[in-house]
Amino acid sequence: MTTITVDDETRRRLKRLSAILNMSQGEIVKASLDLFERLMLSKSYRAEVLLPRKVVKILEEISRKVREEDPEWGRRSKVIEEAAEGPEEAIWGLEI
């Protein structure tokens, strides 16, 4: 464990969110970093960082085959992949 230094406004926001969401400040920071990485890092970068390249290639190949066998599924998948992040991203993965 370690400490970090943040400005007073950030500290107040962190404490407020912690109280509202009934989470520790550490959990708030972790959730914030997870959300930031999902939203800000490109998909290809995330894939390289979070998954071994071999796994990414296998998943891409499976996805390609499924889309070839079922074009309607492929069309729907593409729409979902290109859509904006869902509401669960806005609430940091907490259950509604």
Image: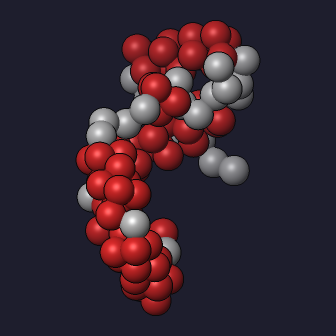
Residue drawn at (29%, 46%) of the image = 79
Vertical relation: 28 (above or below) 76 = above
What is the x, y in percent for residue 83? 30, 40
Q: Nearer the viewer, residue 14 or 68?
A: 68
Vertical relation: 9 (above or below) 52 = above
Residue 78, quarter of the rendered image: bottom left
Task: Count the labels in the image.
Answer: 0
Residue 20, quarter of the rendered image: top right
42 lies left or right of 76:
left
State how the image is colored: secondary structure
**Is residue 60 something that shows in the picture?**
no
Residue drawn at (50%, 13%) of the image = 12
Residue 92, quarter of the rendered image: top right
Q: Nearer the viewer, residue 8 or 30?
A: 30
What is the x, y in percent for residue 13? 48, 15
**Is residue 58 something that shows in the picture?**
yes
> In the rendered view of the protein, which quadrant contains the C terminus?
top right
Q: Nearer the viewer, residue 11 or 22?
A: 22
Residue drawn at (30%, 36%) of the image = 84
What is the x, y in percent for residue 16? 57, 11
Q: Nearer the viewer, residue 91 or 22?
A: 91
What is the x, y in percent for residue 75? 30, 55
